[in-house]
Image (spheres, rainbow, N blue to C red):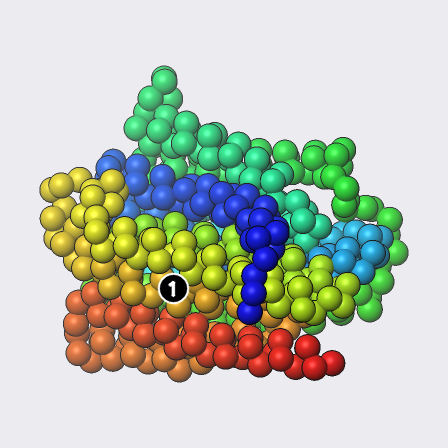
Amino acid sequence: MKIHKSTVWDVLRIALPAVGEMILYMMIGVFDTMMVGQYGGNLAVSSVGLSSEIIYTFSNILVSNGISIGVASLVARKIGAGKKELAEEYATLGFLSTAIISIIVWAVLFSTSSIIFRLIGAEEKIVSLASPYMKIASIGIAFNMLMNSLNAGLRGYGNTKTPLIASVIINVVNIFLDYSLIFGKFGMPSLGARGAAIATSIAQVLGFIFIAIYMYKYSKIKVKLKYIKDIDYSMVKSLMKLSIPSSFQEGAFSISRLLSNFFIVSLGSVAFAANQITTSIESISFMPGWGFAVAATTLVGHKIGEKNYKKAKEYAYCSILLATLVMLICSVLFLAIPRTLFSLYIGAGEEKVISEGVLCLMVASIEQPFMAISMVAGGVLKGSGDTKTPFKVSVISSWIVRLPLMFIVIYVLKLSVVYVWIITTIQWIIDGSIIFILFRRRFNEIESL
């Protein structure tokens, strides 16, 4: 189909700040991993990496790709339909739900950190580093979830610039405190992995405060107390109807990935460190896909609300095309300079980690375009009000394809961590292909209405 120049600019206007925001958020984990790797080698990388995987699995399932997706989709469609008050009510209900979830998540992570690591069979050295990290980081993730909920309302309205500014603040604070508290600079104590957790938590608290003040004073869409005092439970039901399948989709993917990491732990700290650094590098490439998915959810949601289905379809295809092109550039970088990228994370003395990781990263280059299609086509479907289809596809690719193959490779065939990435690539090829076919079918049905 023909894509107009104005459509490209509309997509870029919303996508680029979202891409920048998520790259900056991902850089929090990148800098944590990079600095603790330089400070404590593969053991520190494994400890912080495993903790972060568990923490963000909770956050992503319940809020980032759960409540926040429901909020963004509903706000976008209500704004498109000219119903601003309903949009604000959904944003408020989303924030209330997130507040309850964030308290529960903090309590669970803080009180059971060492139990979790021992249950998954982590080495005692890893437990001793990872458990304090998780206790401290659980405070920050609670505020991060609250901020994410507020950001979802802003994105649904079409404002992706303010969340970007918040991410800049968080990164500046995090980098400065990481360097100061991990290595003991500027008169501060050298705390290693604990310093990284303190730095990240402080930065996330400040980020939430910034967004809360902006929404209260300046935002065109606000969270309002009156909607909490008199809750409309039919609207809560509508929000959950979208949020729960989206949470399940993220759960199907994130829990399978977390279980895969538990499998990889059994291969030893060298294999796990190689896997974790590869994941950290590749995570930067997720961000263009995620940013264009945000643009697709918002713009398609607006046009669905206006009942302009032709324009919604044009925004959808434009977002998929742009995301795929950007992530193909990441593929080229992963193939061209894998050793250079790895050397940023860990010292030259960890040659075994680097050698395995370079091969993992080169394999990961193959999955990038399929990942882009999956993320953005999924965002389009969510913007149209369909969160069930991405969930079903994720169940197939994660639980029927990825996990069984991973178990066979690690526990039966006892192959290296490189084969884990071959399986992940197969997963994304299947996931991206299926969801693109279903996305096209969905829009053909909408256009025929």
* Camera-side residue of 268 and 212: 212
> In the displayed structure, would residue 198 be above or below residue 225?
above
Residue 231 seen in the current view:
yes
> In the displayed structure, would residue 192 be above or below residue 89?
above
Left or right: residue 143 versus residue 42 is right
Q: Which residue is mark 1?
A: 369
Name the quadrant containing residue 356: bottom left
The quarter of the rendered structure image containing the N terminus is: bottom right
Label 1 amino acid? Pro
- Where residue 210 appears, x then y in whole percent? 63, 34
> In the displayed structure, would residue 341 be above or below residue 394?
above
Look at 53% across and 38% down and name the residue there.
167
- Where residue 189 appears, x then y in whole percent? 35, 24
Look at 41% across and 57% down and name the residue there.
325
- Where residue 359 appears, x then y in whole percent? 18, 59
Left or right: residue 197 versus residue 266 is right
Left or right: residue 110 versus residue 344 is right
Residue 69 seen in the current view:
no
The quarter of the rendered structure image containing the C terminus is: bottom right
* Camera-side residue of 9 and 408: 9
Look at 84% across and 57% down and name the residue there.
83
Q: How many marks?
A: 1
- Where residue 42 appears, x then y in whole percent? 22, 47
Look at 22% across and 76% down and name the residue there.
409
In the structure shown, which secondary structural element does the residue marked by tag 1 occupy? Answer: helix
Decide: few, some or many residues near mark 1? Use Cα within 10 Å; few <14, some 14-19, many ≥20.
Answer: many
